[in-house]
Amino acid sequence: MWRLGFFFHEMGFGLLSVFLPLYVVSEAVRGSLFDIGIMSAVALFLAIPASFFWGYLCDKTRRYKRFILLSFSTSALLLYVFSLATSVYLLIALYALMAVLHVAHEPPKNILIAELYSRADWERSFAFYEGFTEVGWLIGLILGFLASAYGLSQVFTLLLCSGLNLVAFALSIVLVADPLLVFERRLVGIEKSTDFASRGIFLASKFLDGIRVNERLKRENINAFCVGLVLFSLATSILFTPMPIFVSDTLKSAALSSSLVFAVFVLNSAGGVLGYYAAGSRSEGRTGKTSIGRIVLFRSLLSSLLLLTIVIISSVYSVVLLVGLLVLLGFANAIFLVSTLALSMELIPAGRAGLFNVLIGLGGAFGSFIGPFIAQTMSFAYVFIAAGVIFFVAYAAFRIF
């Protein structure tokens, strides 16, 4: 039940994720793709130290609820202020401030899942959480589609985002509670060290007995894991930051209503829900390592196939192909996120719980500027090529890990 507040929070941000880029380039604000890139990049860069700070602070105090409440309450307040602002520079400043406060709930959420469940259930628990909140994100997109289809005002849409976060804050006051004991991650760390020592002794004894040893004693390459996370986030951000604009242009070229942008991202989110379900249903123990490389390589292929949506002659077929690829991209991202979240809680020591969000934010910050910049100065074809290549390099990093 403690996840219910997060459900409404994701509903608000699901609506905002597509609405905000369209709002920035609307007649009310008169911004550009550059402004979208700057807004996202500034916000994500500021969120990087904030993620590490919130993660350190909540682990230090062992108080997690207060940071979740801080995130939801300030998001509700700042989104209300959004409805009063029409200057693109003010929107950038407000969005940056909201990003710093918004990430306060991410490390505590990850720690709650890690401490409330055993290591064997982490993948399944993360999958359930992400799938449950992804449904909220999907409903938010549907609300955006309905608001656009019925011609509701942009101010009303922003107030709706604010109200959903206010509901999340109220529910979390009642439903979220700090765990009485915090020890599961430390036990996992002890288990990994003990297992490594045990394998070393076993191989040494075989060698001393004159038995040929083919197995190598090797720890995970955490640096390669971190590099892979940054690169994956970079490619994802390059691809998806300008994506609402590309979808809107593709729909217009097919003589379809621009309000269908939300419907397209609803299907992308539905692919994510299916991915979380698949990750949870197949997860029995520590299966994440085996799927990460394949999923990243699959994302590289899908990003490259997006080029076909540009070269296909029939605009209607372009829309159908675009929707299909976005569904598959959402499905693959869900499995990747579940696997890496569980592994990060195993690899990253207590006190540094925000490092996962720092790495994701670092790639996202650069990508959120690079993606719109490439789209504005060259074309979306180069956006897809860049994302595909970087996904492939991320695959190489995870292979090293």
Image (spheres, grey):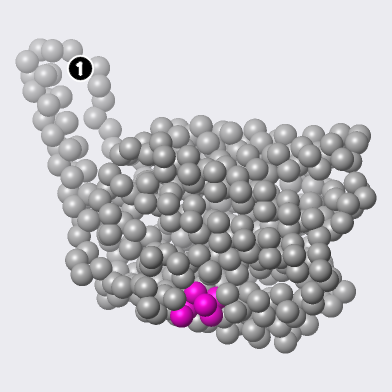
Q: Kindly indicate the quadrant of the structure image that contains residue 85.
A: bottom right
Q: Whole-percent x and y of residue 276? A: 49, 46
Q: Residue at x 69, y 39 (%)?
A: 325
Q: Residue at x 41, y 32 (%)?
A: 290
First to last magenta residue range: 165-170
**Which residue position holds label 1?**
213
Q: Residue at x 85, y 50 (%)?
A: 251
Q: Residue at x 61, y 79 (%)?
A: 162
Vertically, is 390 above or below 130? Answer: above
Vertically, is 125 above or below 365? Answer: above
Q: Whole-percent x and y of residue 38? A: 70, 67
Say whether residue 169 is magenta: yes
Total numbered labels = 1
Residues 85 and 251: in front is 251
Q: Is residue 313 left or right of residue 179?
A: right
Q: Whole-percent x and y of residue 244? A: 75, 56
Vertically, is 261 above or below 47? Answer: above
